[in-house]
């Protein structure tokens, strides 16, 4: 009987050691696979200088917020990524309309949108409002090179 108990203990110890080894091998394989695939993805994302689209500096804006008690003003410097280089000429001609749209858009926002990490919502709204004006192309991206919310 004592021999049977010792046999069960040895079998249990052997099973535990095998489970630990299998878990270690599976973890190593998992982490190795995902670290290699993320390296390959980052290589794919690297762009050459030819892949970078033209940009347009839309200027700096200091705007009083109209409908918010917590925030009194927003200061932003905005850069647009353009679909094509010819669009910069149209943006120059429409600079007053663009300034008006940006100011109106910023004034109308609430605290949650303006203080959102990454500012994705406000970028999308500005992009949509400016693209409504344009004829010769579209803005593909909006960047805030400065965004101060107080």
Image (cartoon, rainbow, N blue to C red):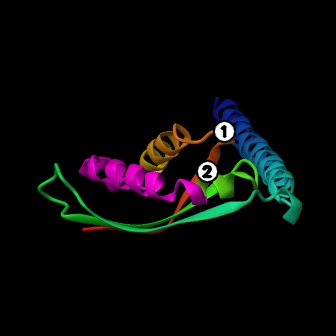
In front: 130, or 21? 130
Residue 35 x/y as whole percent: 79, 54
Judge whether residue 109 is colored magenta.
yes
Question: Which residue is depicted at the point 45% across and 51% down?
Answer: 97
Contact between marks 1 and 2 (CB within 8 A): the answer is no
Q: Which mark is residue 103?
A: none
Q: Quadrant of residue 72?
A: bottom left
Residue 107 x/y as whole percent: 27, 52
Q: Image height check: is 15 above or below 25?
A: above
Q: Image height check: is 120 above or below 95?
A: above
Name the residue at the left extreme.
Answer: 69
Residue under numbered circle 2: 141
In front: 48, or 89? 89
On-image quarter of the C terminus: bottom left
In front: 97, or 65? 97
Along the horizontal axis of the image, is 2 left or right of 121?
right
The mark lying in front, picked from 1 and 2, is 2
Pick whichever of labels 1 and 2 is earlier in the sequence.
1
Residue under numbered circle 1: 9
Question: Which residue is depicted at the point 27% across and 46% down?
Answer: 108
Dot 2: element: strand
Question: Which residue is depicted at the point 77% across and 45% down?
Answer: 30
Q: Which residues are magenta?
A: 92-117
Q: Quadrant of residue 75?
A: bottom left
Residue 28 x/y as whole percent: 79, 51
């Amino acid at each position: 009987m004592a021999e049977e108990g010792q046999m069960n203990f040895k079998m249990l110890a052997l099973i535990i050691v095998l489970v630990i080894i299998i878990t270690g091998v599976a973890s190593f394989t998992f982490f190795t696979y995902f670290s290699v695939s993320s390296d390959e993805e980052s290589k794919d994302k690297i762009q050459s200088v030819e892949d970078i689209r033209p940009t347009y500096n839309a200027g700096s804006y200091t705007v009083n917020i109209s409908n918010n008690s917590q925030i009194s003003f927003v200061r932003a410097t905005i850069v647009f990524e353009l679909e094509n280089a010819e669009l910069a000429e149209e943006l120059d001609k429409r600079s007053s309309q663009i300034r008006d749209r940006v100011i109106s858009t910023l004034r109308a926002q609430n605290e949650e949108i303006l203080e959102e990490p990454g500012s994705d919502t406000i970028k999308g709204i500005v992009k949509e409002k400016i693209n409504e004006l344009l004829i010769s192309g579209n803005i593909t991206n909006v960047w805030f090179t400065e965004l101060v919310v107080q």
